[in-house]
Image (cartoon, rainbow, N blue to C red):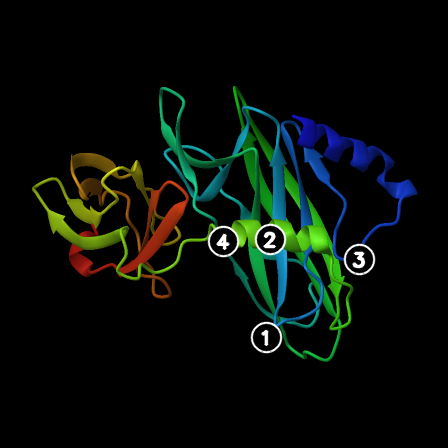
Amino acid sequence: MRRFALILLFGLFGPALPVHAATTGWSEVHGGAVRLIATGPMEDGRYLAGLEFVLEPGWHTYWRYPGEAGVPPQITLAGSENVRDIEVLYPAPERYSDGFSESIVYHDGIVLPIRIVPEDPGRQVRFSIEVLFGVCKDICVPGDAALSLDLAPDTETDSLAERLIARDLEAVPGAAKGGALEITGVALSGPNDSLRIEAKVPADGTPDLFAAGPAGSYIGLPKLVDRTGEKAVWRLSTNGLASDDGDRTLRLVLTSGDVAVELLETIPPDWLN
């Protein structure tokens, strides 16, 4: 609550203060606010920015796929200049049930890190996006924002933005490396068109599994059906799973505590109804 109050206070009095070039103002909706931030100078030929959401207590927004209900962030370039490519990264989410449906969400606050590749690294980048999103508590509120930043090789480092982006960049799941957390098998199994997903998990952890299909997919959340020591098994219905010529990937994110790993599984024809 204190963090959100300070943000609103800054939003009210911000125009009287110096505005850092690598941070936009807040765009507020009922239950939360969103802004665009960036670390500053280019590294490895790319800029690192972030779409930061802050939410009032009890409110949530959604992962790349919302689950059984919700509105995921929909991010589009809108008037960007000298931008060749962007990659939006999603930190590991959490499961939320309202008693009627299960969703995949973020609470409190989250930064979606964004990697920006310029067309010409020697020229200034005008990074402009439009984002549609939803925030929910007892009601769901749609939000939209148009946000822009100017970035250049000599842009001053924003230390606060750098820390915020680095914090949630660490929570972005990566490929498993043979540790205590790993998805070990994915196969179509049973008469009900469901996937059996097996994983190695810490014996003392509380694992969870999330899934996102290609655009146009409307799948549920994986259901934990067995947990014995360091082995866990989930079932995921393939009903609603879609694919297109450009994307045949099922994205699986396995979490336990603060650790998350990701497996990208190619969807074979027999998984599709």
Q: Which amino acid is tagged 3?
A: Ala
- Distance between the Cα atoms at labels 3 and 2? 16 Å
Q: Is residue 79 visible?
A: no
- Distance between the Cα atoms at labels 3 and 1? 21 Å
Position of residue 60 in the picture relative to residue 126 (left or right) = left
Depth check, mark 3 against mark 2: the one in front is 2
Position of residue 80 in the picture relative to residue 272 (left or right) = right
In the picture, the disc for residue 165 is: 2
Residue 251: horizontal and vertical position, in percent?
33, 54
Q: Residue at x 36, y 30 (%)?
A: 102
- Distance between the Cα atoms at labels 2 and 4? 9 Å
Depth check, mark 4 against mark 3: the one in front is 4
- Distance between the Cα atoms at labels 4 and 3? 25 Å
Q: Which amino acid is tagged 2?
A: Ile
Q: Is residue 168 above or below residue 47?
A: above
**Residue that numbered label 3 is attached to:** 21
- Distance between the Cα atoms at labels 4 and 1? 18 Å
Number of residues whose C-alpha sits closer than 10 Å to that of mark 3, classed few (under 14), some (14–19) or many (20 or more): some
Residue 35: horizontal and vertical position, in percent?
68, 45
Q: Residue at x 75, y 72 (%)?
A: 124
Circles 3 and 1: CB distance less than 8 Å?
no
Which residue occupies the extreme right position in the image?
16
Position of residue 33 in the picture relative to residue 101 (left or right) = right
First in sequence: mark 3 or mark 2? 3
